[in-house]
């Protein structure tokens, strides 16, 4: 018997006249890390749940770790996931995903995933997202917006997979907008469609794995006040990362990207000091 791939439904949502689930209202998942109230106290962590639930894993006087857990089948057509992250000056946060995400065929309805990140001076955030799978027939817009205070450090890993097993995948628009008080650090937009690959963009690679490391400027220095290897801008293969390509950003920081056939083949990973303030 041939294997059949199905799309889940969310039974707690009202139905439209055509028998399709109604789009979910926008519900924001919030994570805020605030400075301790006194000497020896841990950082304060405030959370609220949307389509993703935020669960505190650990914290001490300077940093916290929070896990993001899906509250049900997602992303369905009409879903809009919003994650708001705020980290106070001098504090650090590590975000982890519990299980990857699949954007399902929405029967003509698009879905969205938006992350809004605000880091105070000297704050740090490391977020290593698990694979985000764009199933056949899905239409997804995924955006990451970040604003960095002076000396703040941001490390993001985003892994997008076009299609489940046996699929070519749907459409996805990936947009990243990172800036500090001086101006833009990284602005990028990438559109891909598994069933309509564009020559010279992804080829026949279904996996787009991206690791971004940037810092906010220090003392008004446009390059962030941090040393960076290589030239002011350029690209090339990085030793120890196989055929991944590293872009050295004009204002400091790096973007490393790997295109491949399967997520387990990717050479990218976060370093052990993830989440350090200002790292």
Image (cartoon, rainbow, N blue to C red):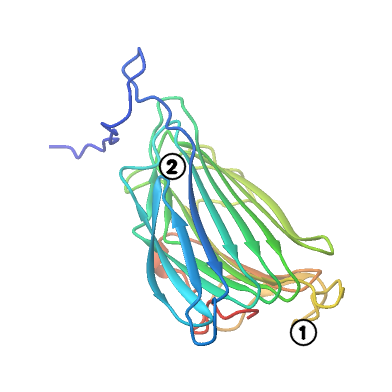
Q: CA distance from mark 2 to mark 1?
A: 39 Å
Answer with mark 2 or mark 1, whichever residue precedes in sequence: 2
Of residue 130 and residue 154, the one placed in the foreground of this image is 154
Give the image quarter of residue 57.
bottom left
Viewed as shown, does residue 7 lie left or right of 48?
left
Which residue ends up furthest to the front in the rendered image? 38
Above or below, 174 relative to 90? above
Viewed as shown, does residue 56 lie left or right of 180?
left
Q: Position of residue 63 (x, y in %)?
A: 51, 78
For the C terminus, give its image quadrant.
Answer: bottom right
Q: Position of residue 174 (x, y in %)?
A: 59, 48
Q: Which residue is mark 1?
A: 227
Which is more foreground, mark 2 or mark 1?
1
Q: Position of residue 20 (x, y in %)?
A: 34, 22
Q: Are marks 2 and 1 in contact (CB under 8 Å)?
A: no
Which residue ends up furthest to the top in the rendered image? 17
Of residue 207 and residue 66, the one placed in the foreground of this image is 66
Tag 1 secondary structure:
loop
Q: Position of residue 1 (x, y in %)?
A: 12, 37
Number of disc labels: 2
Within-10-Å neighbours for mark 1: few <14, some 14–19, many 20+: few
Tag 2 secondary structure:
loop
Of residue 94 and residue 230, the one placed in the foreground of this image is 94
Give the image quarter of residue 149.
bottom right
Tag on residue 96? none
Q: Which residue corresponds to the image point at 60% horizontal and 83% vertical from the top-left? A: 239
Q: Which residue corresponds to the image point at 49% horizontal and 70% vertical from the top-left? A: 44
Tag on residue 169? 2
Viewed as shown, does residue 202 lie left or right of 128?
right
């Amino acid at each position: 018997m041939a294997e059949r791939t199905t799309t889940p439904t969310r039974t707690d949502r009202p139905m439209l006249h055509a028998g399709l689930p109604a789009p979910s209202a926008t519900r924001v998942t919030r994570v805020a890390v605030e400075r301790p109230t006194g000497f020896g106290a841990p950082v304060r962590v405030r959370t609220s749940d949307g389509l993703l639930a935020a669960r505190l894993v650990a914290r001490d006087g300077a940093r916290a770790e929070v896990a993001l857990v899906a509250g049900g089948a997602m992303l369905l057509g009409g879903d809009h996931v919003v994650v708001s992250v705020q980290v106070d000056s001098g504090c650090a946060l590590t975000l982890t995903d519990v299980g990857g995400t699949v954007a399902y065929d929405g029967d003509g309805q698009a879905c969205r995933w938006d992350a809004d990140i605000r880091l105070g001076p000297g704050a740090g955030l490391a977020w290593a997202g698990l694979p985000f799978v764009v199933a056949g027939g899905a239409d997804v817009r995924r955006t990451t917006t970040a604003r960095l205070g002076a000396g703040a450090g941001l490390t993001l890993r985003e892994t997008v997979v076009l299609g489940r097993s046996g699929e070519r995948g749907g459409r996805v628009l990936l947009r990243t907008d990172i800036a500090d008080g001086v101006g833009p650090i990284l602005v990028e937009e990438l559109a891909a469609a598994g069933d309509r690959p564009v020559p010279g963009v992804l080829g026949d690679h279904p996996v787009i794995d991206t690791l971004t490391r940037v810092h906010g400027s220090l003392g008004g220095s446009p390059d962030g006040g941090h040393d960076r290897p290589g030239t002011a801008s350029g690209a090339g293969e990085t030793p120890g990362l196989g055929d991944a390509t590293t872009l050295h950003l004009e204002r400091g920081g790096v973007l490393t990207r790997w295109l491949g056939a399967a997520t387990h083949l990717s050479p990218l990973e976060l370093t052990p000091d993830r989440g350090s303030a200002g790292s």
